[in-house]
Amino acid sequence: MSLYEPLLRNVLWPAYEGGLRRRDTPRYLREYAQTQWLSSDAIRDLQFKRLKKLLTWCEREVPFYRDRWAQMGLSAGDIREPSDVALLPVLTKADIREHAEALKAVSHKDSLAYKATGGSTGEPLRFGYTRESNDRRVAVMWRGYGWAGSRMGRRTVFLWGGAVGEPTAAHRFKDRVYNTVFARKLLNSFAMTEANLASYADAIDAYRPEVIVSYVGPLVRLAQFLVDTGRRVARPATLIGAAEALHPFQRELIERAFGAPVFNTYGCREFMLIASECEHRDGLHVNADHLLVETLGADGKPTEHGTGEVAITDLFNYGMPFIRYVNGDMATRFHGLCACGRGLPLLASVDGRKLDAIRTPAGHVLPGEFFPHMLKDVPGLARFQLVQRQLDRLDLSIVRGQGFDDASLAYIRREVAKVLGESAELHCHFVDDIPLTRSGKLRVTVSELDS
């Protein structure tokens, strides 16, 4: 460990985050560092206590929940034990779009910050959150990544989606300072092609990171290149896969290429880090002291066995609470305790986050996340689906909402052209609806090419 790591973690970061910025993230990080070691029963008790407090708040402050529960003859007082949460209805993306204002707590409406999801189900979503919620999410992220050896100040390469559009000079300067302080280097995975894979290996060699954090798809492609060519790069201590399902054969390939262990994580923009592997890598620990994560069967009731639809409650976003929010993912629970001794429950796997990669004659391979990432901020874009049926053609179906205009379409064409050039034609189609799959899902990126 370098001397800089403890200096950043124990002196510089707390002074900046807690002192200058007056954020409570350092305090929350200390809190979560302790609660992870509680027994599983103690964590369930703590989780339910926090849930009850949130439900009481929602009944008093959030019109959407107060009215919906009253229509069902329910009240916060009816949730007397953890299993009673199944009495509450789930929250869908359609609910959020239709009732966005009513989902905001009356006393917090004017103080919320906002983010947009990447629309990995084809429907970008804007949501509000409180400062406490954000600070806690950052603390949980540092805890979970820390299990994989990603400590604050440790040299890290992020093989991640680059900025879409032209960032301002001030934004670029801020990013440079941030990345320097935290010893990070960003490599834009959206620019990766068959022809430039060696340059990514060169960049890793030059920076010599101890940690690599990456979308799974680009990391697998780079690993395959290293194995196929016999190329060796500076060996990191650990790698972290994110944003996509990490399959066992992919983990084996990455570890063979880089000579280091790979850790799996599960998160989404609405909540940040939901679950992650510890040093034993025997399932993903759910951040149950921060979130309530359920898996629901086909009947909509909680299930402990087999794959189920994920429903998540943020226990600390009092500004725009998401209670039993179904985000379109599927997961399987793990039964038993981890040898690490943490009382946090486990997921055996995350089963429903695989998006098709897009290929072109020029050798571009775009991870499925590119299009949700690029399209999330397009005004008036209600839903979309990109389908590739032949190598040199992409078909983008667009469901227009209020605010979509010629500038929105021009933006889409311009940003896609930046990445693909003239190697593939983009055909945009305006449609009234986008059909679901037989399983009831909307696949946002579909490749029908032979693998």
Image (cartoon, rainbow, N blue to C red):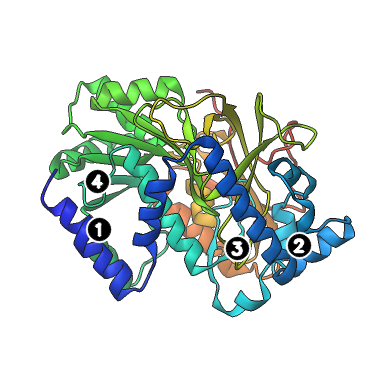
Given the image, on which type of amino acid does mark 3 rest?
Answer: Arg
User: Viewer-proximal residue, 128 or 258?
Assistant: 128
Residue identifier under label 4: 156
Residue identifier under label 2: 65
In the rendering, at what x and y percent does residue 52 appear? 66, 55
Given the image, on which type of amino acid does mark 1 rest?
Answer: Asn
| Quarter assignment of residue 389 | top right
Looking at the image, tell me whether mark 4 or mark 3 is earlier in sequence order. 3
Residue identifier under label 3: 126
Q: Disc 4 vs disc 2: Cβ atoms closer than 8 Å? A: no
| Quarter assignment of residue 108 | bottom right
Q: Disc 1 vs disc 3: Cβ atoms closer than 8 Å? A: no
Residue 8 lies left or right of residue 313; in this view the side is left
In the rendering, at what x and y percent does residue 190 appear? 39, 46
The Cα–Cα distance between marks 2 and 1, rounded to whole angstroms, is: 41 Å
Residue 143 lies left or right of residue 15; in this view the side is right
In the rendering, at what x and y percent does residue 299 appear? 80, 33
Residue identifier under label 1: 179
Q: Disc 4 vs disc 3: Cβ atoms closer than 8 Å? A: no
Quadrant that contains the N terminus: top left
- Dot 3, crowdedness within 10 Å: few (<14), some or many (≥20)? some
The Cα–Cα distance between marks 1 and 3, rounded to whole angstroms, is: 27 Å
Looking at the image, tell me whether mark 1 or mark 3 is earlier in sequence order. 3
Secondary structure beneath label 1: helix
Given the image, on which type of amino acid does mark 2 rest?
Answer: Tyr
In the rendering, at what x and y percent does residue 310 appear? 64, 40
The residue lying at 43 percent from left, 25 percent from top is: 282
The residue lying at 38 percent from left, 66 percent from top is: 166
Given the image, on which type of amino acid does mark 4 rest?
Answer: Thr
| Quarter assignment of residue 29 | bottom left
Q: Which of marks 2 and 1 is in front?
A: 2
